[in-house]
Structures are given as C-alpha cells and as structure tokens.
Image (tube, rainbow, N blue to C red):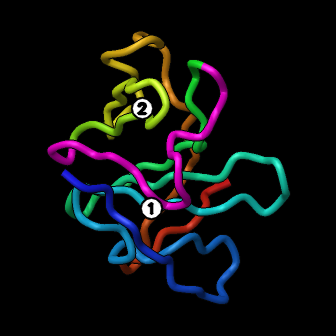
Amino acid sequence: MRPARNEASPEPQAGFLCALDDIPDGGALEIPADQPGAPGVVILRRGENAWAYRNMCPHFSIPLNYEPNTFWAYDAELLMCAHHSAMFRFEDGMCVDGPCEGAALTAVAIRIERRQIFNND
C-alpha cells in the first residue's frame, strides 16, 4: 500500500478547508496550520463522511506524517502514525493499537455543505 498525496483546492469562503472530493475516499488530506510551528489539521474521508483532527500524535506530540500531505490509511477505517505505527479510528480518533492505545487524536469541528468542508469553530 502506498500513501496518498493530494493538493487541496483553494476557495475564498471564510472557514473553508477543502472540498470533500479533494480527499481520496478512504484516505486523508493535510491542511497546513496558519501559524508557523502550530499543528495542521488532517481530514479523513469515508464516502460522504469526513472527520478532522489536529495533525499531532498523542504519543510524542509530533505530526502523524513524515512527508507533507502523505498519510497511511487502511481499509477506510484506520489512520497510522508514520513515526510509531499507532493506529487511530477514522470516526473518533481513538488509538486502538500502538504505543498510545486508549488515547485519542484531538478533534477539530467541521461541517460539510454542498461537498465543501468548513471549520465549524
């Protein structure tokens, strides 16, 4: 299995993160942080559903990916941290295997409108 790489399409609307179709079905997309040094956001997609989390593993507070916008997703169910192989469920960010089992990713509130994903904060 190879990691997926994608580019989000820019949109001028306030709070816009990406289009649902910018994310491969069963995969992930990285939204870089607005401020240097702050964690970005990783958005996961399964069909018409999407979940967003801070791009930071709870094990060592490091990004979930080695390379920009490259994530390991398995069966549209689990996201793997590239550093220590912790496995997180798409739907709740809970670590179900690995060094931080029982911990969870920090959720980012989003909403989907007409296949567009917006920050819901």
Which label's residue is closer to the chain start, 2 or 1?
A: 1
**Predominant SS along the magenta part:** loop
Q: Position of residue 45 (x, y in %)?
A: 31, 57
The C terminus - image quarter: bottom right
Q: Residues within 10 Å of mark 2 (few under 14, many from 20)?
A: many
Amino acid at the residue labelled 1: Leu
Name the residue rendered at 57%, 18% in the picture: 59
Out of 60 and 114, give the one closest to the viewer. 60
Residue marked by disc 2: 93
Q: Say what secondary structure mark 1 lies in.
A: strand
Residue at (56% x, 30% y) in the render: 57
How many numbered circles are shown?
2
Q: Are marks 2 and 1 in contact (CB under 8 Å)?
A: no
Identify the residue shown where x is 33% and y is 77%.
Answer: 21
Query: Please, which residue is most extreme toward the left here?
Result: 75
Confirm whether the magenta stretch covers residue 66. yes
62 is higher (above) or lower (below) than 18: above
Position of 26 with respect to 10 (left or right) is left
Residue type pointed to by label 2:
Gly
Asked whether, in this view, residue 67 is left or right of residue 15, the answer is left
Decide which of 30, 43 is in the foreground and name it. 30
Image coordinates of residue 36 in percent, x first then y, are 84, 56
Give the residues drawn in magenta, as a range: 60-76
- As helix, strand or loop, the secondary structure at mark 2 comes to loop
Of 121 and 51, nearer the camera is 51
Drawn side of residue 92 relative to residue 7, left or right: left
In the rendered image, the residue lying farthest to the right is 36
**In magenta stretch: residue 45:** no
Give the quadrant of residue 22. Answer: bottom left
Q: What residue is disc 1 on?
A: 29
